[in-house]
Image (cartoon, grey):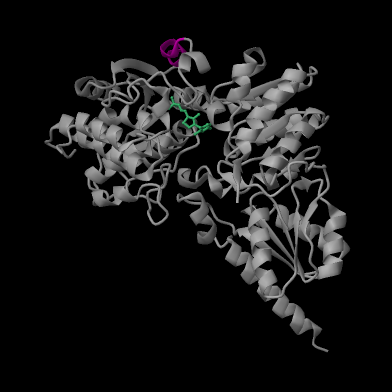
Amino acid sequence: METYQVDLSEIALRIRREIVRMVYNAQSGHPGGSLSIADILTVLYFREMNIDPKNPQDPKRDRLILSKGHASPALYATLALRGFFPVSDLAGFRKIDSHLEGHVSREIPGVEVSTGSLGQGLGVGVGMALASKIDGLDYRVFVILGDGEMEEGNVWESLMAGYKYNLKNLVAILDRNGIQLDGYTRDIMPLHDIHAMVESFGWNVMEIDGHSFSEIENAIERSKRSDRPTFIIANTVKGKGVDFMENNPKYHGSPPESEDLYRRAMKQLGEEI
Amino acid sequence: MKTESLRDVYGKELVKLGSVDRNIVVLDADLSSSTKTGYFANAFPDRFFNMGISEQSMVTAAAGLALSGKKPFVSTFAIFLTRTYEQIRQSVCYNNAPVRFVVTHGGITVGEDGATHQIVEDVGIMAGLPNMNVIVPADSVETRSVIDYLAGVDKPHYVRLSREKFPVINDEDYEFRMGRSKTMRDGNDITIVADGVMVSKSLEAAEALKKQGIDARVINMSSIKPIDRDAIIKAARETGHIITAEEHSIYNGLGSRVAEVTSEYYPVPVRRIGMRDTFGKSGKAWELFSYFHMDVKDIINEAMTCLEEKNYENIP
Ligand SMILES: Cc1ncc(C[n+]2csc(CCOP(=O)(O)OP(=O)(O)O)c2C)c(N)n1
């Protein structure tokens, strides 16, 4: 596997800046759940995943499915910084003359599958993992899910299939930020004990701090030795990195509403003005 | 022209209905702040159920409530209701359970959210179901009247609303009648049958055509199922060519239904304006109409083409 000698925290900060810039430019989009997965995507794309921007269709490549497709800014920024397409494209996010669709679109280099309707990504991941068995390839399939998304029955149906077919190369990562669209997950539809629930479906469950590079990396390394599909519960903060967005349901789907707030966010994310 | 939000009117009307009728209950799937059922949730927390991001569970629960004498209103974005098509078919329609689906964010006026969210197939999907009734209101005034009407129905209904505000084209005292259309403007050269926001676009087109001496009839066909057959046959007979305009696929939607009526009862050319077997895309809502050739100028062009054909046919 290609090793990438880079400073992960610098990259994660850069991804976060691009996220805020994109939603501010577009005056629409979902900053909260994008900021919460920036560290996870950083580790995956700059440390763990076997991918090559120059050969994005390599049959042996690792796959990533962003099942919570509204967090498109995070994935687009990551793919651009990793070299799949020019960073300057990010300015077109959500605009009519751009390829950067509002929700994750397969038209974009590096994207495996279009998403945006919640609950479907893990099932697609099951299919890709089944294909790897048939083809005798040992690529890995990562699926990032939201905790609100866990309310979709489709997710649980796919958990059953992952267990039945013993898809050891399938790794689900739950962005457990505690907030969905209408408010806090505990109020909208409480997930009683997600750890025990998924474990009882036969998966290998781990729980980590989703903002710690080392914990993310360790969990993914450990998943390689699992004899079952892996489900990583990553405890995160929605809006991570921008004080007024952190843990604030309002910024699920709203950009900073003034230039002052935008500048404040960018400053907190290390932009030198 | 004054514009007004259809979903906002919906949310407020629900609260009014809820205060006089205790049987009204409302279900949403984690979108109550966008569909505006949040107003009802605040006013009547005991009769509001946020079912989470679980549309199938929401729809089946609504069927149970309806079969137990309640009057459920069910809301989410149009796109996400369609994942429960089969639950709607079995648990709602086959039981003839009077569930009121009032969905928002239909069509391409969803704008920036893009192709994944811009459903242009829903009207066809829903209208294909036995027992289901389908309404696409043209503006906020009509929406209010439709919501009032829904309180008293005894069958499943599907009402498609939008994200964007639409121009207000009906007078305050307008009353929606199921199965009836409204002729917004009379004319005998050609007829434009439209629904939703395309009614106001068609009126604009008719205004421009008038300047060129062409009298276009504009019909608001908000009641897609049952459809106003008489108005369509009358238009076919009196004006010949018909143009349909909808913020939906030209397949299985208003255009298809109008063509079904004309081909059975009074065949005339029917030209359909709408999405042509394609997904949508991100962009500003109102830019997308011209991108997909569904704007006022496209209606005008289609009308001109039809009239040329008509003149050609009339040459002895
Ligand atoms: C099937 C479906 N229903 C509803 C929505 C609308 N929606 C978009 S994001 C969201 C909340 C998602 O919450 P969560 O999965 O926790 O994501 P996060 O908080 O990490 O952004 C909802 C309800 C959707 N995209 N798909």
Residue A13 visible in the displayed image = yes
- Locate the C terminus of chain A and report the quarter of the image it occupies: top left
Per the picture, the main secondary structure of the magenta-coloured stretch is helix
> With B55 as the anchor, is B231 left or right in this view?
right
Q: Is residue B2 magenta?
A: no
> With A224 as the anchor, is B41 left or right in this view?
right
- Relative to B16, residue B256 above or below: below
- Relative to B271, residue B70 above or below: above
> With A114 as the anchor, is B71 left or right in this view?
right
Q: Nearer the viewer, residue B251 or B202?
A: B202
- Locate the N terminus of chain A and report the quarter of the image it occupies: top left
Query: Number of numbered discs present?
Result: 0
Highlighted magenta segment, given as a residue range: A193-200
> With B214 as the anchor, is A17 left or right in this view?
left
Residue A190 visible in the displayed image = no
Task: Give me the residue at 84% from left, 57% from top.
Answer: B231
Rendered location of residue B7, percent (x, y): 61, 36
Query: To which quarter of the image does residue A75 belong?
Result: top left
Rendered location of residue A25, percent (x, y): 33, 44
Q: Is residue A196 magenta?
A: yes
Task: Give me the residue at 34% from left, 51% from top.
Answer: A92
- Relative to B178, residue A86 above or below: below
Rendered location of residue B73, percent (x, y): 70, 27
Q: Nearer the viewer, residue B98 or A56?
A: B98
Task: Give me the residue at 39% from left, 57% from top.
Answer: A97
Q: Nearer the viewer, residue A153 or A222?
A: A153
Rendered location of residue B214, percent (x, y): 72, 73
- Relative to A127, residue A156 above or below: above
Query: To which quarter of the image does residue B98 belong?
Result: top right
